[in-house]
Image: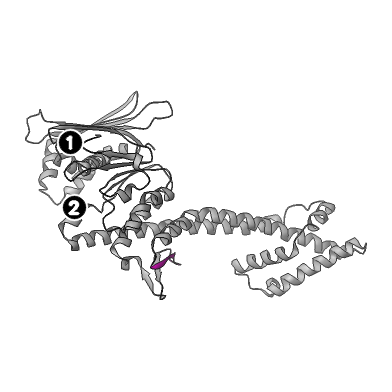
C-alpha cells in the first residue's frame, strides 16, 4: 500500500491554492483559527474515502494527491475535480485515479443521484451512496489504507452530550475490533500448541539416533532446568496424571543422573539405556517447547506492547486484557472497570491507540484533527510517538494547536497561511 507524498488544492474557498509535501512518518498542520488546516485535512480524508458530501460542501476547483512510487518507479495519483460548466445548479464531482502509465480510471456522479444525495430526499440515501461509491472506494482502498479519526471537533462543538455519545459509540466499535483481534492472536497460539502436541506424537515414529550421540547429548543436560521445563509443559497442557506430577518428574531426573554415573562406572545395562533414551526424547520435547514459547511471545508482542503503552499513560489504573480478550482497568483499590467506564480522556486515548494497533503494522495514512482535545498535557507529548510505536509504518497527518502534540517533531510542521 502507498503513502501520500504531496497534496495540491486549487482555488480553495474560491481564492487560495494550497500545496505541500508529506513527510513519510509525521506531518503537522498548524495555524490560527480560520487558517484552513482543518478544511485541508477534511478534504484529504474526503478525497481518499470518496466522501462526496464533504467534497460538495467545501468550495474548491481540484485536488491532486500524489502517492509513493510503485516498484517500477511510477507515482500513482488521485485527481478530484469539480465541473461547474454543465447546465446544473450543482457541479459534478469527477475522479481520475491513475495507478500506472496505462492504468487510468474515471468516475463521475450522475445528476439524479447527485441531487438526491445533496438534498437527502430519501431514506434510501445510504444505499444510493453505497452503490455509487463502491467502484471508487475499491480503487482507492487498493492504493491507500486510510484511518480518519471520526471523533471530530464538530461533535464537540455541538454539545457535550452529543460528543460523549459519539465517543462511546466509537469506543464500543474499537473495543469490539480489539477483542476480535486479540481473539485471533489467542487462536494462533492455540494452533501452535496443537501443532506442538502433534509433533510429539509424530516424533515417536521417527527412527532413533545413534546411541553414542544420545549419551553425548544427555551428558550435557542441566537436569534441574529440564525438570522445571517438564513441569511447566505438563501444567500448561493441563496434564494432571500421577506420572506427570512434579514429584515424579524430579524423581525421573534424579534417575537419569544416577544412570549417567553408572555409565561412567561401566555398570550400564540395557534397562539403563532406555532411561537415557527417554531422557533424550524428553529433552527434544523441551527444545520444541522453548521454540513454542518464542513463537507465542512473537504472536503476543502487539498485545503486550499495547498494554505497556497504555499502562505508561494511565497512572490511576492498571490496564489488562481479560479472559474474554476485552480491555479493562483495575483501580488501585482493586475495582475492575470496563472500558466504557473510563474517563473521557482515557476513552479518546484508547480509541486512537487502539486504531493504531488494529492497523497491524501495515502502511496506513492516519489523519486526526486536533487530537489534543480531552487529553492531558503529558499524554499529548507522547501521543505521536506512541502511535508510531504501535504502528511504525503509519503515516500521520495531524492538524493541531498544541505544541505538546508536536513534541519532538518540530521539523515536521507546516504553518497554514505561511508555508502552504
Task: Look at the picture and state if 47 lies above or below 160.
Answer: above
Q: What is the span of residues highlighted in magenta in the rendered image?
A: 315-325
Instruction: Give the Cα distance between marks 1 and 2.
Output: 27 Å
**Residue 142 has which mark?**
none
Seen at 45% across and 59% down, the residue is: 308
Quadrant housing the N terminus: top left
The image shows residue 350, relative to residue 393, as above or below, that is below
Query: For this view, does 236 lie left or right of residue 220?
Result: left
Q: Position of residue 148 (x, y in %)?
A: 29, 47
Q: Nearer the viewer, mark 1 or mark 2?
A: 2
Residue sitting at x 35%, y 65%: 339
Horizontal side of residue 92 vs 66, given as left or right:
left
* In the image, residue 85 above or below residue 342: above
Q: Secondary structure at mark 1?
A: loop
Residue furthest top in the image: 101
Q: How many numbered callouts?
A: 2
* Quadrant showing the C terminus: top left
Q: Which residue is mark 1?
A: 109
Query: Where, by quadrant of the figure, is residue 26 drawn?
Result: top left
Identify the residue under disc 2. Answer: 154
Q: Position of residue 161 (x, y in %)?
A: 19, 63
Colouring: one colour
Asked if the stretch drawn in magenta spans residue 79, the answer is no
Amino acid at each position: 500500500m502507498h503513502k501520500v507524498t504531496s497534496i495540491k488544492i486549487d482555488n480553495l474557498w474560491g481564492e487560495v491554492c494550497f500545496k505541500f509535501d508529506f513527510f513519510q512518518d509525521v506531518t503537522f498542520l498548524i495555524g490560527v483559527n480560520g487558517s484552513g488546516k482543518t478544511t485541508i485535512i477534511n478534504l484529504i480524508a474526503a478525497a481518499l474515502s470518496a466522501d462526496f458530501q464533504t467534497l460538495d460542501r467545501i468550495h474548491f476547483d481540484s485536488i491532486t494527491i500524489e502517492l509513493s512510487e510503485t516498484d517500477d518507479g511510477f507515482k500513482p495519483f488521485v485527481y478530484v475535480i469539480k465541473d461547474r460548466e454543465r447546465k446544473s445548479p450543482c457541479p459534478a464531482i469527477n475522479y481520475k485515479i491513475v495507478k500506472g502509465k496505462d492504468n487510468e480510471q474515471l468516475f463521475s456522479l450522475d445528476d439524479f443521484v447527485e441531487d438526491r444525495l445533496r438534498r437527502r430526499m430519501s431514506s434510501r440515501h445510504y444505499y444510493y451512496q453505497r452503490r455509487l461509491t463502491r467502484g471508487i472506494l475499491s480503487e482507492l482502498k487498493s492504493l491507500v489504507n486510510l484511518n480518519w479519526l471520526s471523533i471530530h471537533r464538530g461533535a464537540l462543538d455541538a454539545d457535550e452530550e452529543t460528543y460523549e455519545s459519539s465517543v462511546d459509540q466509537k469506543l464500543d466499535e474499537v473495543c469490539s475490533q480489539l477483542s476480535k483481534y486479540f481473539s485471533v492472536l489467542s487462536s494462533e497460539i492455540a494452533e501452535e500448541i496443537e501443532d506442538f502436541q502433534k509433533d510429539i506424537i509424530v516424533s515417536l515414529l521417527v527412527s532413533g539416533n545413534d546411541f553414542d550421540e544420545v549419551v553425548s547429548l544427555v551428558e550435557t543436560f542441566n537436569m534441574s532446568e529440564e525438570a522445571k521445563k517438564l513441569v511447566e509443559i505438563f501444567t500448561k497442557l493441563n496434564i494432571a496424571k500421577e506420572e506427570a506430577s512434579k514429584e515424579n518428574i524430579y524423581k525421573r531426573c534424579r534417575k537419569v543422573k544416577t544412570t549417567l554415573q553408572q555409565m561412567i562406572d561401566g555398570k550400564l545395562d540395557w534397562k539403563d539405556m532406555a532411561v537415557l533414551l527417554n531422557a533424550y526424547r524428553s529433552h527434544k520435547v523441551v527444545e520444541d517447547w522453548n521454540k513454542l514459547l518464542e513463537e507465542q511471545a512473537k504472536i503476543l508482542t502487539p498485545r503486550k506492547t499495547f498494554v505497556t503503552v497504555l499502562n505508561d499513560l494511565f497512572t490511576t489504573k492498571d490496564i489488562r486484557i481479560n479472559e474474554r480478550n476485552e480491555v479493562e482497568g483495575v483501580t488501585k483499590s482493586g475495582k475492575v472497570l470496563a472500558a466504557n467506564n473510563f474517563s473521557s480522556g482515557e476513552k479518546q486515548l484508547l480509541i486512537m491507540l487502539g486504531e493504531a494497533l488494529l492497523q497491524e503494522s501495515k502502511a496506513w495514512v492516519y489523519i486526526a484533527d486536533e487530537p489534543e482535545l480531552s487529553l492531558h498535557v503529558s499524554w499529548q507529548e507522547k501521543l505521536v510517538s506512541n502511535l508510531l510505536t504501535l504502528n511504525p509504518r503509519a503515516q500521520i497527518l495531524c492538524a493541531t494547536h498544541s505544541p505538546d502534540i508536536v513534541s519532538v517533531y518540530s521539523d515536521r510542521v507546516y504553518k497554514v497561511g505561511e508555508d502552504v
